[in-house]
Amino acid sequence: MATALMVKALINGIPVEVEAGTSILDAAKKVQVNIPTLCKHPDLTASAGCGICIVKVKNNRKLLRACCTPLENNMEVMTHDPEIVQTRRTVLELIMSNHPTDCLICGRNNDCELQKIAAEFGIREDLFERVLPEIPVDKSTGTIILEPKKCIKCGRCIDVCQNMQDVWALSFIQRGFKTRISPAGDIKLAESPCVRCGQCSAHCPTGAIFENDETQKVWSLLQDPDKHCVVQIAPAVRVAVGEGFGYPVGTNLTKKLYALLRRLGFKAVFDTNFGADLTIMEEGTEFVERFVNKKGPLPLITSCCPAWVDYLEKYYGDMISLFSSAKSPHEMVGALTKTYYAGKKAIDPAKIKVVSIMPCTAKKYEISRTEDMSASGYQDVDVSLTTRELIRMIKQAGIDFKNLPDEDADLMLGDYAGAGTIFGATGGVMEAALRTAYFAITGENLKDVNFTAVRGLQGVKETTVNVKGTEVKIAVAHGLKNVKFVMDKVRDALKNNQPLPYHFIEVMACPGGCVGGGGQPYMVTDDIRKQRAKGLYDEDAGMPKRCSHENPFVQELYKDFLEKPLSHKAHKLLHTHYKARPLYVK
């Protein structure tokens, strides 16, 4: 392996050595110097858009932007002096002259990068005339809200949407002082190719894009004595919610969350991990039917991610037959709450309201889909909140979250195997499915249930699994740009009548899977995604039962209610269907 070329320089007089090509911004961090920036995000290519990160370099008359200037040998860099600080203040004042000051009613109040940096620079008055564009708020998707007048034109959302996700729902339109973010053609976001993944909101530094906050709707339901409110939490929520309360990234707070949700007033606390185990029973059986019994086309593509479903219907409508018909786990739990649970507890399902806490903005869209999402006669899930919304609810409730005792979920729809919890990380659905598919095909449990080849943050993971002499070719893709690569590979093989590149495919719209979902706490990086995923894999490793088919409450559910995977009743309650949709809605 070739040795990396290194460069040596001075930053504020401190020697530093980094690999060639490292930006001044990143090099400075190695010597504990933080250069402020608004447009740069670790996930994204530097755009040099904001101008906050300017620095001086000896023998260079220009102020250089640290985010996109590579450190060179023998450079002498000055990152902070009175002139630099004053220039940064002026840039901030100019940005703020085009920005509203209604911080108290902004969705990003106290969690806004512009607000934070303005406070750090002690900006207390307007030195430039405030000129605010009159641009209407776009609430058309019902999932994320676009408020362009709060945009600072950093370009993060556009970089995410176009280059990371390859969706192209957002762009800059007009020029000069009139430049703003919008779907191309200045149409509504719901009319665009937007798949509601929320990565734009997760990367926006201000309140220009944020989730549709529905916490007040949940408070109203909890306060209604005629409603029986039930809640469930997704796998990835438990390893991210603690970031809102000072816990180390990746801390698993499952049992504390159960206690918290009861304190909020929910009558029953379930776990989406149970739904994940159930999904594996249905989806794993579906794969066996197609792969072993030749009853259906291959490859089978997993179905837990609603942003991916939206993407499939818009971009790959010709391949819908390959898609698993199994609903996502929280929809399964919702459907069973209003049928199985309601029957067991003799509760009128019309009075049951199901709230799901998800790492995802697209779940808000998924629960509104009419395609079989109310097969029980009632909408499966009534409200879907993001992790960020839950954090706000906890703080509103005045509960001392850190000192709550641990509690257990209501086991009827709350107990889960290790396979259920790893759903939150890219590769987790595939790993969980393979554990149960192996059992379904061979009648034996694996001696080692760990499929490490599908773990990690590589954009596309391809491997072959040997099942008693039969090779199963699998692929795992996360981030829609990577998903496109896999799907195009399959489409080309089918079109040209070539051998299939894969038999089984897992796809997730968000980089890292649900741990990096669009509704998770802000400023996610690959390091944070890894730590959140580790929290899930560590829980799985310590579980007494690690395969979905071993979950005794899932076994009881089939025995008492559903009969068997893919039964008529299971199909009615736990499966859905899809249809091709146009990229642009008129």
Image (cartoon, rainbow, N blue to C red):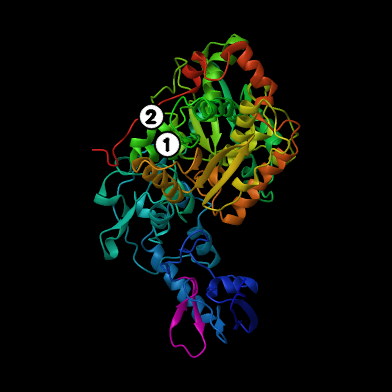
Q: Position of residue 143 (x, y in %)?
A: 42, 39
Q: Which mark is residue 543?
A: none
Query: Judging from the image, what secondary structure is the residue with disc 2 in?
Result: loop
Residue 216 on the magenta segment: no
Q: Quadrant of residue 4?
A: bottom right
Which quadrant holds the C terminus? Answer: top left
Farthest-out residue, bottom: 59
What segment carries the magenta color?
A: 52-67
Which quadrant holds the N terminus? Answer: bottom right
Disc 1 designates what residue? 309
Disc 2 designates what residue? 578
Q: CA distance from mark 2 to mark 1?
A: 8 Å
- Residue at 50% across / 63% down in the picture? 118
Q: Position of residue 105 (x, y in %)?
A: 45, 46
Image height of 561 relative to 49, above or below = above
Query: Judging from the image, what secondary structure is the residue with disc 1 in?
Result: helix
- Crowd band around label 2 with a 10 angstrom C-alpha radius: few (<14), some (14–19), many (20+): some
- Crowd band around label 1 with a 10 angstrom C-alpha radius: few (<14), some (14–19), many (20+): many
Q: Position of residue 186 (x, y in %)?
A: 26, 49
